[in-house]
Image (spheres, rainbow, N blue to C red):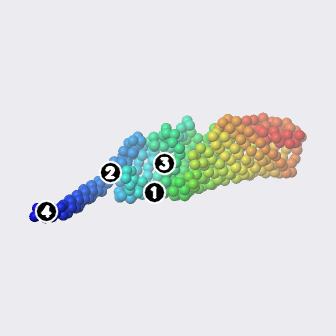
Amino acid sequence: MAQEDLIIGEARTPGRKRRWLRNGVGVFALLLALAALGLWLQRKEIADGYVADFLAQNDIAASYTIESISPRRQVLRDIVIGDPAAPDLTIDRLELAIVPRFGLPGITELVLVRPRLFGSYRNGELSFGALDPLLFTQEEAPVAFPDLRLVIEDGRGLLDSDYGRIGVKIGGGGNLRNGFSAELAAVADRLALPGCAIAGPTLYGTLSIADEQPQFAGPLRFDTMDCAAQGVALANGAVQMEAHAARDLAGFEGGYALSAGNSRIAAASAAGIAGEGRFSWREGTFNALYDLTARKFETSAASAAELAVEGRVRAVDNFARIDLEGDLSGRDLRIGDDLEGAIGAAADAGEGTLAAPLLDKFSASLA
C-alpha cells in the first residue's frame, strides 16, 4: 500500500506543477494587462512628459496642445516655440506616425501643417531663436538624413537679415533619404549685398532629395542688379539652375543658363546677354565654365553686333584669388579711332573685376 501511495503521489505531482504554472502565467498576464491598461489611460501624460523632457533638455521654450495619442499616431496642435509674443516657430498641427518598439518609438512620418518659421542673419550669424540649441550643436557628427517621410503643408518662413527681408514658401513631401520633393519659393523686395543692390529678386523651383543628395532646379530672377564698385549693371536678369549637393553637404555642382536685358560692364554696354555653363564648389575652391554672348556690344572706341566669350573661372581660398581664362570672338566688329586708349580706360575702371582680364584679352586680340 505504501508503494501504491508512492506511485499515486508521484503521478499527481506534475499535475499540481502544471496548475501552479498555469496560475502563475495567468497572474503574470493579468499584471501585464493591468500595466498596459494603466499606460493606455495615462498615455497623454506619458507623451506629454516625453515631449516636455525633450524640449527641456534642449533649452527650448514651447507650448502645445495634445489632440490625440494612440500607439501608432500622435497629433499635437497650436505649437508655439519661443516667446509667444514673437515666436520663432509656430505649427498649426503636427502629426507623427509611430512604429511601437522597445525603448523609444520609431517615427516613420512627420506631417507639418502650416508651419511658420522666423529667423535672422546678423553680423554673419544665422539664428532661429529658441531653436538654436537644437539646430546648431557643437558635435562634429557626419550629416545623415533620417529615414522618415516628411510632409509640409503650406510652410512659410521669414528671414530678417542685414541685406534685407526674405520670405520663403515651401510645400511637398516624401522620404528624406530618397523621394522627397517640394516646391520652393523665395522673394525679397530688395537685397543690399556688399557692393551690389538687387531689386525684385525671386527664386522658384523644386527642392528634392535622391539617394541622400539634395537637389534644386528652377530660375533665379531679378529686376535690376547694380554693382557700382565693380561697374556692373544688369536689367531683367534670369538664371535657370540645376544643382545637387554631396551627401555630406560639403560641396555642390550643377549647370546654369543665364540671360539679361540692357547691361553695362565697366565702360562697355550691351543690349542683352545670354549664356550657359557649369560650376562646382568644394573645400573653398570654386570652378566654373562659361559660354556668354553679348548683343549690340558697344564701347566708346569699338562695337560689335555680337561678342562671344568662352572660358573658365577658378576661385580659391573662398574667392580670395580669382583666375580667369577665355577666348573672344565677334561679328560685325567696328573699330574707332582710339581703341587702345578706350579699352585701357575701361580695364582701369573694371580693375579687380572679371571685366578687366576680358578687356585685356580683347585688346591683345586686336593688336
Q: Indicate the secondary structure of the residue bearing disc 4.
A: helix
Badge 1 amino acid: Glu
Q: Could you tell me which residue is drawn at 45 percent across and 56 percent down?
A: 108
Cβ atoms at labels 3 and 4 below 8 Å apart: no
Residue denoted by label 3: 117
Between marks 3 and 4 in the image, the one whose residue lies nearer the viewer: 4
Disc 2 from disc 4: Cα separation: 61 Å
Q: Nearer the viewer, residue 321 or 238?
A: 321
Q: Could you tell me which residue is drawn at 78 percent across and 35 percent down?
A: 348
Q: Position of residue 336 (x, y in %)?
A: 88, 42
Disc 2 from disc 1: Cα separation: 20 Å
Between marks 1 and 4 in the image, the one whose residue lies nearer the viewer: 4
Q: Quadrant of residue 357?
A: top right
319 w.r.t. 252: above or below:
above
Number of numbered markers: 4
Q: Earlier in the sequence, mark 1 or mark 4?
A: 4
Badge 4 amino acid: Gln
Badge 3 amino acid: Leu
Q: Could you tell me which residue is drawn at 65 percent across and 44 percent down?
A: 281
Q: Earlier in the sequence, mark 2 or mark 4?
A: 4
Q: Nearer the viewer, residue 150 or 220?
A: 150
Residue denoted by label 4: 3
Q: Could you tell me which residue is drawn at 68 percent across and 47 percent down?
A: 279
Between marks 2 and 4 in the image, the one whose residue lies nearer the viewer: 4
Cβ atoms at labels 1 and 3 below 8 Å apart: no
Q: Earlier in the sequence, mark 3 or mark 4?
A: 4
> Of the numbered discs in the image, which one, if any, rests on residue 13?
none
Residue denoted by label 2: 46
